[in-house]
Image (cartoon, rainbow, N blue to C red):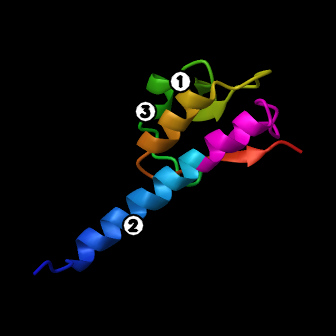
Amino acid sequence: MFYFVPHVVRQVAAQYRFFLEVFRRRLYLEWLGGCSMARVPVLDLGECTDCDGCITVCPSVFQRNDTMGYIEVAECEAYPEEEIQEAINICPRGCIRWEDEN
């Protein structure tokens, strides 16, 4: 007989939710022809630990302000979504997120 281990069930459910969200976003973008609302990356400086992971992954968007000593998001016409999503995924504190541009 097969028994479900609670932590395994939670892990599988979390992976399912993640992949379902990725699939929904890709499908949504395909239906709209890539014309979704513009999103911009936002960095929460209060949570940032200055690990420089985002700068390593996406130096065209995340830059260190040498004068003030913190990481900032550069202004861009279009942001490289895959690189920024990778920076979001590797951020140890989860301080990078997407926001809809209004």
Q: Quadrant of the N terminus?
A: bottom left
For mark 3, what is the residue? 53
For mark 2, what is the residue? 13
On the image, the x and y values in percent for residue 87 come to 50, 35
On the image, the x and y values in percent for residue 13 come to 39, 67
Q: Earlier in the sequence, mark 3 or mark 1?
A: 3
Q: CA distance from mark 1 to mark 2?
A: 30 Å
* In the image, residue 73 above or below residue 102: above
Q: Is residue 54 left or right of residue 33?
A: left
Q: Is residue 72 left or right of residue 40?
A: left
Marks 3/1 in contact by CB < 8 Å: the verdict is: no
Which residue: 46% across, 39% down? 50
Q: Amino acid at mark 1?
A: Cys
Q: Earlier in the sequence, mark 1 or mark 2?
A: 2
Mark yes or no: residue 69 visible: no
Magenta stretch: residue 38 in it?
yes
Which residue: 69% across, 26% down? 79
Q: Dot 1 lies on which element?
A: loop
Q: Amino acid at mark 2?
A: Ala
